[in-house]
Image (cartoon, rainbow, N blue to C red):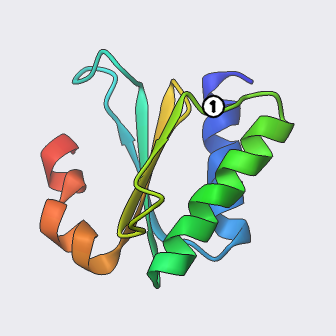
Amino acid sequence: MDHEQLKAFVVEKIEDLKGRDIIDLDVSEKSSITETMLICSGNSKRHVVSIAENVVVEAKQAGNPPLSIEGRELGDWVLVDLGDVVLHVMQDDARDFYQLEKLWG
């Protein structure tokens, strides 16, 4: 999958589980680690983990397994590193607190 295909794939998998407030940040000029950060919100710990797990399972099946997954145990904020695309699935409180959009935007 090329970069744009991967990004579209991840957004589709977020939408499949009703993730909301999806933001696409181009961080290619600010990060040597990734090109895009996708940020979305879930309604509860279980919802946040479910969205992230859906992306992980579907990415593996598509032959693009994540490099790492962080935060599944707590469920406030789960990070899925897919290389060129890093996904942050957050509950509203964590999203408001960390304000990644302002930090990286």
Q: Is residue 12 above or below residue 70?
A: below
Q: Is residue 93 above or below residue 3?
A: below
Three-letter code for the amino acid on which mark 1 is drawn: Glu
Q: Quadrant of the N terminus?
A: top right
Q: Nearer the viewer, residue 70 or 36?
A: 70
Taking the image as shown, residue 85 lies to the left or right of residue 98, namely: right
Q: Is residue 60 above or below residue 28?
A: below
Q: Nearer the viewer, residue 19 or 74?
A: 74
Give the labeled residue for mark 1: 4
Taking the image as shown, residue 25 lies to the left or right of residue 42, namely: left
Taking the image as shown, residue 28 lies to the left or right of residue 101, namely: right
The number of numbered badges drawn on the structure is 1
Q: Is residue 81 above or below residue 42?
A: above
Residue at 35% x, 69% y is 76
Percent across and percent down for residue 71 are 40, 55
Q: Nearer the viewer, residue 88 or 21?
A: 88
Residue furthest toward the bottom?
A: 43
Residue at 65% x, 57% y is 53
Percent across and percent down for residue 7 are 60, 39
Query: Neighbour class for label 1 at 10 Å: few (<14), some, many (≥20)?
Result: few
